[in-house]
Amino acid sequence: MVANAREAAALRQVEIQKEKEAQEKKKAEEEAKKAEEAAKAERDKSMSLQPGVAVGTMDPQDDEKVVYLTFDDGPSANTQRVLDILDQYDAKATFFITAQQPDYFPMIKKVYDEGHTVGLHSYTHEYDQVYASVDAYFDDLEKIGEVAKEQLGFVPCFIRFPGGASNSISKKYSAGIMTQLTQQVLDKGYQYYDWNVSSGDGGTVTADQIIAQSETDEYTKVMLLFHDTEAKESTIQALPTVMEYYKNLGYSFKAIDRDSLVVHHSVNN
């Protein structure tokens, strides 16, 4: 009887210990989930449109060598291929999206969930529509903002003008519009990003030409323009070589965030 009582007591202690461990594990999992949710909420907020809150700096105070890889015009059939290459280098990048290929909208969330930044480019990317007037531009911007919000739950504050802030094609449709827009987007809480290095892949070019135009040691911080469309096979071919070049020079690859470099072109309209 004594032995049975001792065995029962020992078994009960084991059960109590298991229950305690299970409770501790559950508590740890709940705390980890809360921390993860809090971190996501903080990240979402930092990426979101917040009128009156400054975004970025044009005068970074550090000498860290950084490449900001940026991809315009996606998501597309090539977006996953770009992500795969970035993953190989543990690199982060920024994707300025359009609504040209709705079938790939789910890629917007995947891009963001993998730690990259999503910015706004244009809903239509049709210059005659986007730059018909100031109101037309903001109508287009708000539409692509809604696409992003449907996928991410918020409207990003990072934008890139079709053709960049220095474009002159807008003169055909509305004289002086870029002078107005470059100020008004800032007033509304957005920040626009041009580039200081272009891969040249906006046109028909070879991988070797893209590599030659993308590689430079002129800047400590490189804002590098690429495009993300199904037609840009040469971009996919060139990207690993370009990344190897900068990696070997000691650069890291980061996504744009609220504190990172801002590049503005001179306005020509």
Image (cartoon, rainbow, N blue to C red):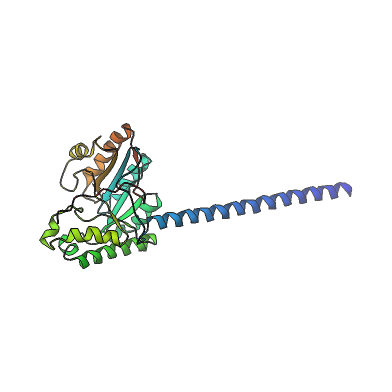
Residue 165 horizontal/vertical position (percent): 20, 54
Name the side, left or right, on which 262 lies relative to 33: left
Q: Position of residue 167 (x, y in %)?
A: 16, 53
In the rendered image, residue 81, in percent from the top left (x then y), is placed at 31, 46
Q: Position of residue 265 (x, y in %)?
A: 21, 49
How many marks do you count on the picture? Answer: 0
- Residue at the outermost right position: 1
Residue sitting at 15 percent across and 46 percent down?
204
Q: Which sits in the foreground, 66 or 266?
A: 266
Quadrant in the picture for the C terminus: bottom left
Report whether residue 21 is seen: yes
**Is residue 87 placed above or below 39 in the rendered structure?**
above
Q: Where, by quadrant of the figure, is residue 237 drawn?
A: top left
Q: Nearer the viewer, residue 95 or 220?
A: 220
Answer whether residue 126 is visible to the viewer in this image. Answer: no
Front position in the image: 206 or 116:
116
Q: Is 224 left, or right, of 64 in this rendering?
A: left
- Residue extending furthest toward the top: 248
Residue at (53, 56) in percent of width and height = 34
